[in-house]
Image (cartoon, helix red, strand yellow):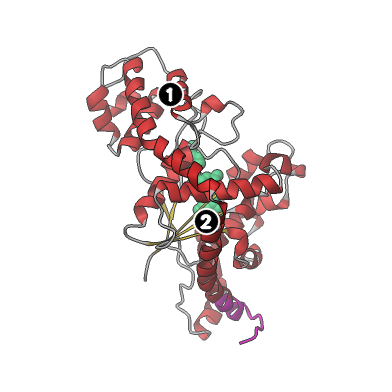
Amino acid sequence: MTTRVFSGVQPTGNLHLGNYLGAIVNFVKLQATHECIYCVVDLHAITVPMSVWGGPDELRRNTREVTAAFIAAGIDPKKQIIFNQSQVAGHAELTWVFNCVARLGWLNRMTQFKEKAGKDRENASIGLYDYPVLMASDILLYRATHVPVGEDQKQHLELARDIAQKFNNDFSESIASTGQNEKYFPLPEPVITGPATRVMSLRDGTKKMSKSDPSDYSRINLTDDADAIAQKIRKAKTDPEPLPSEEKGLEARPEADNLVGIYAALSGKPKADVLGEFGGAQFSGFKSNLVDLAVNKLSPIAAEMKRLTQDQAYVDQVLIDGAERANVIATETINAVKDIVGFIRKR
Ligand code: TYM
């Protein structure tokens, strides 16, 4: 079977180094070997309260910003597909069918819902609860086989596999009678690779770097300029010991582990090599090197993002063009699913 890559990023503002190193760097790499579809998941963005996603103007701004980040990071929108989710109706349509395949018990186990809903669960949106089913639809609408994501999305990928498998089993006879392969939906594989699959907060090495942390010093935003990057790295929390020479010396030193992981990911070297170079050094010296590396790697992306976001017509056209191409694949799946489930349609 042919392989296809799909992944998504939410347009909820504050794209940060975790999104970049955990996901977007791998998006860029995979385009050398795979057909790739990258989606700005605006339907997912509105699952949190409007005060959090920011309202219509903010959503438009953030959708264009994520699109600009994809392109600035090196994804070629002509060769690959870049689009925003709401422009392809199939995402919502397939979600309904999958809502009837997925089980309440499966969704009740999702840790991201528990974290995001917090204590006031009664007041969470139904969309937030259904978030993982929509995510499964995103992937399976294109029958994607590989999904590059950060570590935090592993559980959602497992749910997508469970939904694919249950659909294939529940409808096995119908799948066969419509002439489809018995494994109509592939079981998508998570691609969680590199030294920075879980980038931590610069203020607390036990907390994930996140868009929603109230302290801007906890994260490096992709739009930060050189001064901001330097300041945040210099202020990043560390411990009093020099850097170890071997990886096992990073155990129980979450801040050191995080900074070494960031250096490794930005330089494209394994952590062991970074420790070979900096083992025994004090943090002050290591941080100066990390500032230079981060500014070198991230400043051109920030500059290109800025240029692209000023060219709104171009960015919107990329999304429209991407959505048209995505829709061709999506329609094929939706039609097959309608036939498999037994929905009558115009031919
Ligand atoms: P989002 O926008 O929250 O995150 C986008 C990507 O960034 C990764 N990520 C991190 N990686 C490493 N360290 C971190 N601190 C960090 N924070 C975020 C996330 O794992 C993600 O890969 N649910 C998805 C969006 C989505 C999706 C999909 C992904 C919707 N549909 C279908 C794949 C396939 C999410 O977390 O977005």
Residue ID at (58%, 59%)? 85
Eyeballing the image, is 125 above or below 281?
below
Tell me: 208 left or right of 234: right
What residue did someone put label 2 on?
314
> Extreme top residue here?
240
Pair 1/2: label in front: 2
Mark 1 nearby-residue class (10 Å; few <14, some 14–19, many ≥20): many
For the C terminus, the image quarter is bottom right
Q: Position of residue 11 (x, y in %)?
A: 59, 47
Asked if residue 343 is among those painted magenta in the image, a careful observer would answer yes
* Residue interval drawn in magenta: 335-347
* Amino acid under disc 2: Tyr
For the N terminus, the image quarter is bottom left
Q: Residue 230 — which label?
A: 1
Asked whether residue 157 is in view, the answer is: no
Q: Check mark 1 vs ligand 1: CB closer than 8 Å? yes or no.
A: no
Residue ID at (27%, 29%)? 274
> Extreme right residue here?
122
Between residue 203 and residue 25, name the one nearer to us. Answer: 25
Q: How far apart, in angstroms, are the residues tagged by discs 1 and 2? A: 32 Å
Between residue 168 and residue 26, name the one nearer to us. Answer: 26
Q: Position of residue 141 (x, y in %)?
A: 53, 66
Asked whether residue 74 is in view, the answer is: yes
Q: Position of residue 345 (x, y in %)?
A: 65, 83
Tell me: 266 left or right of 227: left
Mark 1 or mark 2: name the one nearer the start of the chain: 1
